[in-house]
Each structure stands twice: as C-alpha cells, then as structure tokens.
Image: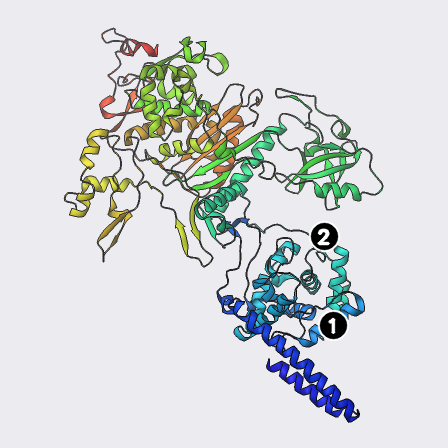
Amino acid sequence: MRRLAAIFANLLILIEKMPIKKSYLNLLFWLFIAGTGASLTVLAGLYLYLSPKLPPVESLRQVQLQTPLRVYSSDGKLIGEFGEQRRTPVSFEELPDLYIKALLSAEDAEFYDHPGVSIRGLLRAASQLLKTGEIQSGGSTLTMQLARDFFLSREQVFSRKFNEILLALQIENELTKQEILELFSNKMFFGNRAYGIQAAAQIYYGEDIDELELHQWAMIVGVLKAPSAYNPLANLERAMIRRNWILGRMLELGHIDQATYEVAMNTPDDARYHGATLELYAPYVAELARREAVDRFGENAYNAGYKVYTTIHSDYQAAAQQAVVDGLLTYDWRHGYRGPEQQLGERPEDLSSWQELLSDTPVYGGLLPGLVLSLEERSAEILLANGDTIELGWDQSLSTARRYLNENARGPLPESASDVLAVGDLIRLRQIGGVWHLRQLPQAQAALVSLDPRDGAVRSLVGGFDFRQSNFNRALQAARQPGSSFKPFVYTAALENGFTPATIVNDSPIVIEDASLEGAWRPENDGGTFLGPTRLREALYRSRNLVSIRVLRSIGLPALLDTLEKFGFDREALPRNLSLALGSHALTPMDMARGYAIFANGGFRIAPYLVERIDDDHGEALHVARPATVCEDCEREQEEEEEPVSLIADIYASEPERAAETGPDERLAPEQPAQLALLDEDEATLEPLPIAPRVLGERTAFIIDSMLRDVVARGTGRRARVLDRADLAGKTGTTNGPRDAWFAGYNPDLVTVAWLGFDQNTPLGRGEYGGTAALPIWIDYMRSALAGKPDRPAPQPEGIVTVRIDPENGQRAQPGDPDAIFEIFRAEEVPPYNDNGNGNGSSDSERLPEELF
C-alpha cells in the first residue's frame, strides 16, 4: 500500500508540472482523484476480504518438498529411485552462478530490486502481449511464481492474481532473497518428472548442476515458461528459440560478453532423457525394497524422501549379476545360433532410419543391438546405435555360430560369414576385452541368491537375465523342483534316525507301488547304472537316486517331515510319497538358500531379510532390522553359568522343561542376553536381541557338512575345486528332462544358490545338469565374493571321533588294513571291527534293515 501511495504522489507532481489550462487541470485532477480513490477502495476491500483466507507464508520455512523413495546398498550405492517427482534438493550455496544469471535474465531481471511485485514487469508483459501476441519475459516475479506454485491454482481469474501479489509481498517480508531462490530452484517443475534444477540437470544432460555449461542452463531455464511447449525432448525447435532468447537477454543485461554469447549460440543442444543415475544395477533388489517400504509406510513412502538401506553389498551384487549373464549366454551359445531378431532387407542409402531403429531397440543384459551393413568372406560390417560401425571378425564367434536345430542338435560349422549373417540382420553384440562377439538374447533364465548364514542378510540377488525384459523374480517367485539338491535334507533326517556316513545302502533297481504316484514307479539313477551296496557318504557325493529312496523308505515319511519342518519348510505343502526323496516338491532358490544356511552355520535356523534400515528425509531411523543371529557362544555361556542373576533366572525359568522336551541335540538356543542384550540401567529392563534357534544337533550338522564338502572334493560338484578352497560344500540338482539345473553351496561366510531353466519348463538339452549349467554361475560368483578371504575349516565338536573303516561294508577296519579309509562318527555310533571274512561276526547286510536292500 505504501508503494501505491508513492506512485500516486509522483503522479500528482507530474500533473502539476504539465502545461495545461487551469480548467482542464482541475478537471483532470478531480477525475484522477475519483478514479484513484475508487481503485484504492476496491483494492482495500479485496485486501480485507482475501487476506484472512491466505495461507500462512511462514509455513514455507517448514515446507516438505516431495522427494522420491531411494534404495541403497549396504555400502551406500544408489540402486533404485521411485516416485512421480524426481527431486534432489540443493542449497543456495550450491546454485551455480550461470544458472542464477540465466534464471533472472529470463524470469525476473529486477529480482533483487523489487519487494515481490514489479509494476514495471507487469507493464512490460502487457506491452509484449499487445505487440507480439506473446509474453517473452513474463509478468510475474519469481516470488509471485513461487507463491502460485506453493499456494494457488493456475486458474486465470483476477482474484487469484491478486492473491498471488499479496502472497508475494508476504513471502518477501518473511524470507530472504537467497531463501526464495533456493526454494524456487528446488520446487519448480522442469518437465519430464524433473522437479528442481538438480533433477533437471540429471534428466536432460545426465550431469550434476556443477557440471553444466551456459547453453545447457539457458535450455533448462527456458523450460520453466511452459514445460510441455519448450521441452527440448518434445519440441527441440521451440526450445532452441527460447534458449537463444535467454542467451540474448543475458548479453543485453551484461551477464555475459559477446564472445561467450556467440560460443553458446553456436553450440548444438545435446539434451536427451537420462534415467535416475544409479550406481549399482540391482533392479530386482530395488523392487523388493520398494515393496517393503510401501507395505510399512503406505503410498507416502514415494514422496517423503525415505531412504531404504538394504543388506546387499555392491561388490557381491555386481559379481552375481555378471555371473548370471555370463552363465546364461554360455549355455545359450553352446546350443546354437537361432538367427536375427529382425530382417530389414537391403541396405538403404540413408542409414538414419536404421540408426533410429537401433536407438529404439532396448539393451538387455549388456547386449547391444546392431545391423549388418555388408559381408566379406569371413567378416561383417555392423552399424551401432550411436552411428559407429565395427567389424565382426571370423574368430569372434562367427566361426562357432552353428545353427540351432533343437535343444539337442546343432547344424554344421559355418564356412563363411554368409552362412551365419545377411545384410539387414538385426543382431546382438557383446564387447569383451575390446573384441566384439556375436551373441543373442537367451531364451532360458537363471537366478542367484546369496545369504550370510549367520543372520540371513541377503548379500546379492538376481532374479533373471534382465529386469527390463522380465520383472518376474525367479529367486523368490519361481518354485521349481530342486532335484538332487534336496537330498542333503533327506540324509540329515537319516543321520538323526540312526544312520551314519558309513551305513551301507543298496544302490539297485526298485519298483514302488504307490497310489499317490498313479501306479508303479520305477526310479532310476542318471545313466541307468547301479553301484550295489554303497556307503551313505558315497551315495550323496555320487548323487544316487535309489539310495535316497531306500533311505526315506527306511526312516519313514513322518521322520523326514519332522526334519524338514525344522529347516523351515511348510509341512502341510510337502508331498506324502517317496518322490520327495528326489526333490519332487517345488521350491524357490530363496527357500533352498534358507535351508542350506543351516548346514553352513552349524545347525541354526535363520530368516532371510533384505532391508537393513529405513530412514526419513532427515536421516532419522524409521525401521531397523533385528534379525535372529547365530550365537554359539551364548549356548556355551549358558552351560557354564553357575548362578545366573535373578532377572535372567526368571526369564528363562522354563528352559529346563523345553530342553527335556526337545532333547540335548535339538535344544533351542536360549535367548541368552550376556553378549547380545541391552540393559537400561535406569529402568533395569532387559531387551535381549533375537538369537537364531538351534534346530540341528551340533554333531549332526558337522557330519552332514563333511559329506557335502565331499560333493565338491570328489563328487558331482568337483568343478568347484577350481576355486582352490577347502571350505566349500554343496550339492548339484537336476530334474527330469533335464528341465532344471541347480547348485546350492556354501562356505561358513556365504551360502549361495544358483538355478537355470526355462520359464516354460521345457527341456534344457542333453547333458545340461546342475554341474554343467548352474555350477559355473555359482563358481564365477563365489570366486569374486570369496576373493581374499582365508579358508574356514569347520571346528570338530566334542563327541565326534575319526576311525578307519572298510569301504566295502562300513565296519571298523582291522589294524594294518591297506584298503581302509577314514570316516567320522558320533562317539556312541562307532561300528564294530570288521570280521575279516572269518564268519565269526554277522555280515553288514544281516545287520541292516530290510528296506535298505
């Protein structure tokens, strides 16, 4: 109001100085007084009417800008961003000087001189509208635009404009110019989901704000006027006109010199869409983390700036992703080349249409699209999406590109490049060590999941070849038959029910009549061979199907179901027939990893978890994981504790009763607070952290672990010996067809499961077993994950003894027997001495249950 009064006073002075007759002067004076009075009365009325309805401007100091949900690895690498608005707030001190000059030149050249409203600016905008039909510089100040964007609608009515002016004046009274610029730069919409200048810089140019040049800032600022009309991605021609006008304004206002202006004007624009700048590719992990955040906090999680920190380690995840891609491409290539994805025909004179097609073709699994331009006898010229051309040589997979016929057959080796490719073929390429290789998108899929067996933290997870191609997460959603990789659970049940690693079981044909199996079932070993009487340890590392079936028939389904329930498997979902011994029940890789973690940690059941912590936008923790953790020392301390404090005694008063019910080998680990508890001294309250329960006796866990180490040392997993480690254990798995290839394995630090197969459950092809298709993925991953980590030998628990046995019958060998081998037993289960065939003792077959023969 004071500014209006000053304007009125100045007008009176001007009128008095005008050389006009007194009668006319009086008339003009009273007309002006009447008009001005009426205007002031209207304005005052509007102010009194609208002012109470305006929102409090001081709320801008506590404004919550909508920022997306971000997902990070455990070591702080960004792996995902979710939300409608992409925004990364910056402080005023971080605003580049060139950006501020470009912004003020385009939107509000008098920003530092006006109190929020510029009369001159409004008059200039009106003049431009009358002269050109378009407003170039805008009539609203930055402060007015900020007021409109925060508090008002965009409805073009006078009351809204008046509110905008009043709010702008209040904002200027409440905030400094620097605060207004900071809010404006973080709040405004720059098109393509970009809110704020940092998001705009990343989306249009893939750079941070301190890396942009003058012509880029002029382009970004130009978008503000109309994000859809002046967007360089949608309308480059109009955007360039706007950019160049802003550069001219900067020159006119003295913000840049002539030379700088000419360089910027002559610089072509290179804006293109850039997605979120991710530091680690882990889309399956990011999606799982997003889902958990939304489940916990609702849709608000998308715009409240929450940060989700996962248990994933970036090095492990990168190794897992590479291992899955390499494993699938290797499997796919050895089954033959299926031909181009598309055939475009003859090469056109103008390659722009081909290049546009390549630019629109997505990159999956790092495989770049390319188009064949020409062929020589043993090479091909290939066009890439960026316009470059490369030569695909004969030795770079052209010489091995035999045609795919079916899963079991390929065509002959090619003799020339034309046997493989034709001009116009859309193909896939992979660059390895600077050399280009012909490849193709695999039709098979694979998954890998890796856990810390001590607490269940997921260290890496890959759900398929490429999330953009298929977001179906096979690590958690693909329930497939695990085949022989399920056998260790059966053998564990056997060890809990009187078997030893030296127990002899007959590996011979068997016919089973079972109504639930729809008639007679004649299971076979792979290859149709039989070993006859076989020790349990050997049967596992040689993966003998018939031994597993005889073992299950001997101990009974109830005993196996009891054991499987301890491992966390759903008892009600498991089949009630002998096919369970061969892994007929469908499980996911995560299910298998959880089960194998018990082998790796010595007998404790853990629960896999992915989200370590969720913070709000101020860094305050909203959720912190509290996983049940293995604590062997807690067990020992509980046994050694002679007189626990009364508080602990009260809490665990029922422990003897629980121990009596479960037995000494299966006793649940007490939630001993000695090392894993927090005691509030003021309130004297105990807050024990959860401890993983023991579900497998220590000695049983040690024995089955030693048997699984033999699978790697001398059995179906022996390819893993290439890692040159003595602490690896695991089991291969293959289903009929073969249709599924598995390897589940571990060392004390890491349990990892790899699976490969078709989503349609079609055959993989002859010879594609767990040891040939899945194990290479596991090896590649573990090579990287365990690099630099020393071997971890398994400590032998009390009550385990090592004796020499006769490998033929499992009995204790006589001293001096040259064929004897070492075996481990529980002390009370050491077998009797071998009778050396003198007939004085009972034979092994006479002592064994009938079901085993």
Residue 248, compared with residue 307, is above or below; it is below
Q: Nearer the viewer, residue 655 or 788?
A: 655
Residue drawn at x 69%, y 40% is 361
The part of the image, by quadrant, that contains residue 424 is: top right
Give residue 14's position: percent from left, percent from top: 73, 88
Q: Can residue 722 be seen in this view?
A: no
Residue indicated by mark 2: 234
Residue drawn at x 73%, y 63% is 243
Mark 1: amino acid: Leu
- The reply, left or right, for residue 572 in relation to residue 407 is left
User: Which badge, 2 or 1, comes first in the chain's sequence?
Assistant: 2
Residue 199, compared with residue 764, is above or below; it is below
View extreme (right): residue: 349
Give residue 546's position: percent from left, percent from top: 41, 14
Q: Which of 483 and 309 is in front in this view?
A: 309
Give me the C-alpha separation between circle 2 and circle 1.
27 Å
Q: Is residue 757 visible?
A: yes
Image quarter of the C terminus? top left
Give residue 429's position: percent from left, percent from top: 68, 37
Mark 2: amino acid: Ala
